[in-house]
Every structure is written in C-alpha cells, then in structure tokens.
C-alpha cells in the first residue's frame, strides 16, 4: 500500500500482474505465433552474426574486453542458430525466410549494448507469447527460448557491462506488437513470400536520457497529433506498469524502477494495449549495484571495470 500510495502521489496509478497483457485482441494462431518467434529470432541471429563478423578478437581487446567475451557471444550465436533450426523445421513450408537488416553498430561497445537490448526484448517476447498460445507444445518452445534469452541478457549486462545481473523478481512480458515495435526498425526488407503477421504498427518512440534517475525528467520524442488530449508515459517494469503524465514533451521518472525498463506512450492510465497504445516501445536503463542503489555507469567506464 505504501509503495502504491507513493507512486500515486508522484506519477499516477499502478497496474500489476497479468493485467500487463490485457486488451490485445490480435488474431494470432499458434502457427503465426511460431512464425513471429522465428522472425524475431532471425533478427537477433543476424545482429550477433554481424557483430562477430565485423569485430575480431583484437577489436574486443582493443576496446577493453577480454577474449572470452567474444567467445561467449559465439556461443550465443550457436544458441540462436538452434532456435531458428527447430522453429524452421517445425513450420516447414510456412517458415518465414530471413530478411535483410540494418543495425547501428559502429564499434564493439555499441554492438554489445544493442545485443543486451535485443536479448532482453527477446526474453520478454517469449514470455509474452505464452499468453497467446492455445495450449500447444509451442508454449514449451516459447518458454525455453525466453529462459535462454534471459540468461544471455543477464550475462551481457553483468559479466560484460558490469551492471546488474537481473532487473527484479519478475521478467517483463511483452505482447507481439509491443516486442516487434522494438525490433522492426532493424528490418530493412523481407521477401515477398514471407507471411503477413497481424502486428499493429506504431511510430517509433525515443526517450532520453536513456539512463535517467528516479524523480528526474525525461524527454519524449514523438509527435502527438491529438490537440488538447492527455497522454502518459507508461513504464513497464516486470509485472508492474506505472504512468507519468506527459507535459510539453516531458515526463517525470517514477521511483522504484530497476534494470532494463520499457516505456511507451499511452492515452489512458491502463496497461498498453491496442486500445490505448500510441507509440512503439523504447528501452530505458536503470542500473543498480549490489546494494540495490540506482547508479548510472558511463559506457566508457563500465566496459573496463574489473
């Protein structure tokens, strides 16, 4: 009650538990959900493959990372290949082909940072997909993939970036359209023969700074066309959603956010759904140390911390 009262006083209401996936009525079938999981796994596999091809062992060591970091990322690449092989085999002729991709990686640090965001998104996508699956074995695939992705993300965030190894007691589930909004910007072009999946599409959202502090201010980069309407920045953290009113493109950061958090613009203080979601999602980071204190670690320092 105290936590809720504090949040109500500062940033508005809180929604918890399975409410975070209410309100999505997209016409998914188990086949299209398997195609969705394969599609996003192909995105991650392409990212990891590009990073490994682009940066040799010497690039990692020159950037301050030990050789074993690149070796472990190669293992992640092998895991992604296994996910793709199994899903492709299960789908047969219905399997979507890989697309072409455009990843904004310019150095080893940007590659690792993007890999952390994508693996975290993949974990959330797998967990969220379970709620849409109609009781088939695909639930086991989705859950197993999500668990593996969560381990990948935890390893990158802690062992490589020297931040926290987890975000909190709950992973954050994302509906397919929410997760896809974080990944589709990296997809340049897909074969015409690929299936059309029932995603809702949303304008891209930028929230900055990407490493804000509790009770501070973030700036929301999104054109809101409804004059006079009230919009909120929804913060998805585990099974909790908090809301901050957006005023003149700014919003106040709630207290109690930890680790990797998703943000989205909504038109009401309800969990994001097709009824109120106005934007795609953005990733905002709230690193914390072993004493659970919020701490912002500059990227040029974190990669070299012992």
Image (cartoon, rainbow, N blue to C red):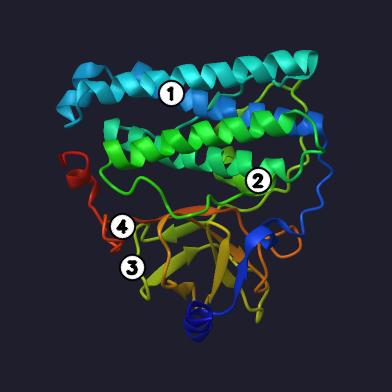
* Circle nearer the viewer, 4 or 3: 4
Secondary structure found at label 3: loop
* Circle nearer the viewer, 3 or 2: 2
- Residue 245 location (% of width, % of height): 54, 77
* Circle nearer the viewer, 1 or 3: 1
| Residue wearing tag 3 | 213
Q: CA distance from mark 4 to mark 3?
A: 11 Å
Say above or below: 4 vs 137.
below
Name which residue lies at 53% across and 42% down.
121
Task: Using residue 86 as the reference point, say whether residue 33 is left or right of it.
Answer: right
Are there few (<14), some (14-19), or many (20+) residues within 10 Å of tag 1?
Answer: many
Q: CA distance from mark 2 to mark 4?
A: 25 Å
| Residue wearing tag 2 | 128
Say above or below: 107 vs 167.
above
Are there few (<14), some (14-19), or many (20+) residues within 10 Å of tag 4?
Answer: many
- Residue 105 location (% of width, % of height): 37, 33
Say above or below: 72 vs 179.
above
Q: CA distance from mark 1 to mark 4?
A: 25 Å
Q: CA distance from mark 3 to mark 2?
A: 27 Å
């Amino acid at each position: 009650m105290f936590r809720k009262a504090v949040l109500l006083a500062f940033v508005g209401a809180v929604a918890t538990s399975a409410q975070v996936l209410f309100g999505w009525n997209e016409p998914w079938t188990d086949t299209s959900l398997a195609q969705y999981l394969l599609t996003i796994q192909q995105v991650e596999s392409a990212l990891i493959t590009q990073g490994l091809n682009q940066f040799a062992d010497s690039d990692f060591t020159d950037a301050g990372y030990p050789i074993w970091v690149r070796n472990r990322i190669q293992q992640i690449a092998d895991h992604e290949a296994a996910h793709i092989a199994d899903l492709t085999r299960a789908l047969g002729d219905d399997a979507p082909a890989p697309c072409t991709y455009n990843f904004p990686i310019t150095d080893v640090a940007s590659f690792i940072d993007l890999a952390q965001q994508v693996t975290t998104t993949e974990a959330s996508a797998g967990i969220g997909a379970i709620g849409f699956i109609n009781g088939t074995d695909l639930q086991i695939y989705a859950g197993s993939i999500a668990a593996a992705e969560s381990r990948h993300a935890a390893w990158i965030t802690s062992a490589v970036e020297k931040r926290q190894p987890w975000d909190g007691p709950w992973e954050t589930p994302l509906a397919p359209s929410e997760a896809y909004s974080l990944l589709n910007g990296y997809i340049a072009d897909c074969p015409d023969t690929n299936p059309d999946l029932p995603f809702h599409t949303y304008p891209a959202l930028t929230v900055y700074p990407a490493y804000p502090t509790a009770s501070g201010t973030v700036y929301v980069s999104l054109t809101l066309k409804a004059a006079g309407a009230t919009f909120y920045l929804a913060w998805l953290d585990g099974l909790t959603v908090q809301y901050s009113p957006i005023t003149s493109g700014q919003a106040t950061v709630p207290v109690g956010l930890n680790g990797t958090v998703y943000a989205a613009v909504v038109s009401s203080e309800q969990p994001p759904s097709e009824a109120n979601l106005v934007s795609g999602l953005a990733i905002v980071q709230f690193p914390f140390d072993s004493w659970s204190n919020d701490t912002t670690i500059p990227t040029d320092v974190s990669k070299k911390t012992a």
